Image: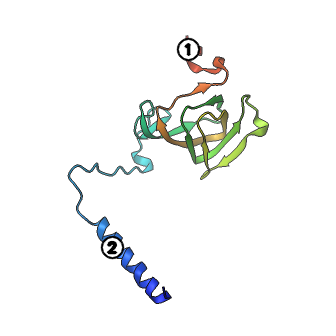
Amino acid sequence: MKSGMRSFVSVLLFIACVCLAQAPQSKDVVPAKIFTPSTISWSEDMAALLGDPAKPGPFVLRIKMPDAVVIPPHWHPEDENITVIDGVFLMGMGDKFDRSIMKEMPTGSFATTPKGMHHFVSCRGGTIVQLHGMGPLVFKWVNPEDDPERKKP
């Protein structure tokens, strides 16, 4: 196909996409959810933006982490996706918490941990991360003594 014809076809495809995007939608369509920093509803240090991380299905969760917090080695039965929204997130892989092997993830970084991957995390300074994946979000502790449920009185 010649260059001029390719450009013409590209423009036609673009116009078709714009027209389809403007097509009326069914009354059953769920409206879009748009969040800005001022409209995010935080509950303590978490905000569920989509779904419920405790239930089956997709979820998006924001978490505020205090400086130097430590989340000991654990794994999840589903893939976990992490985006650093603000701050410096630190993540290492393995069965023992070891700061020397943690990777530094500054604002804008992304990581994915496949289901079953043993990992541990911390942060430098107050940090906000966004987790997304398929729920329920379950933590399996490599060392059962690290389970916060066991430490409750």
Q: Is residue 25 above or below residue 131?
A: below
Which picture quadrant has residue 96? Answer: top right
Q: Looking at the image, do the residues carrying marks 1 and 2 touch, with CB atoms under 8 Å apart? A: no
Residue 152: which numbered mark, if any? 1
Q: Which residue is at 79% across, 38% downward?
A: 100
Q: Residue furthest right?
A: 100
- Residue for point 46% across, 31% down: 136
* Amino acid tagged 1: Lys
> In front: 148, or 44?
148
Q: In this figure, what is the number of numbered marks?
A: 2
- The residue lying at 76 percent from left, 33 percent from top is 98
Asked whether, in this view, residue 135 is left or right of residue 123, the answer is left
Q: Quadrant of residue 93?
A: top right
Where residue 81 sits in the image (x, y, percent)? 56, 43
Q: For marks 1 and 2, give the CA distance.
A: 59 Å
| Picture residue at 66% right of the left edge, 36% below the top | 122
Rendered image quadrant of residue 15: bottom left
Mark 2: amino acid:
Ala
At numbered mark 1, what does the secondary structure look like: helix, strand or loop?
loop
Q: Position of residue 54 (x, y in %)?
A: 44, 30
Furthest-front residue in view? 1
Which corner quadrant holds the C terminus? top right
User: Which numbered disc covers residue 16?
Assistant: 2
**Residue 149 in picture, x, y percent from top left:** 55, 17
Which numbered mark, 1 or 2, is in the foreground of this view? 2
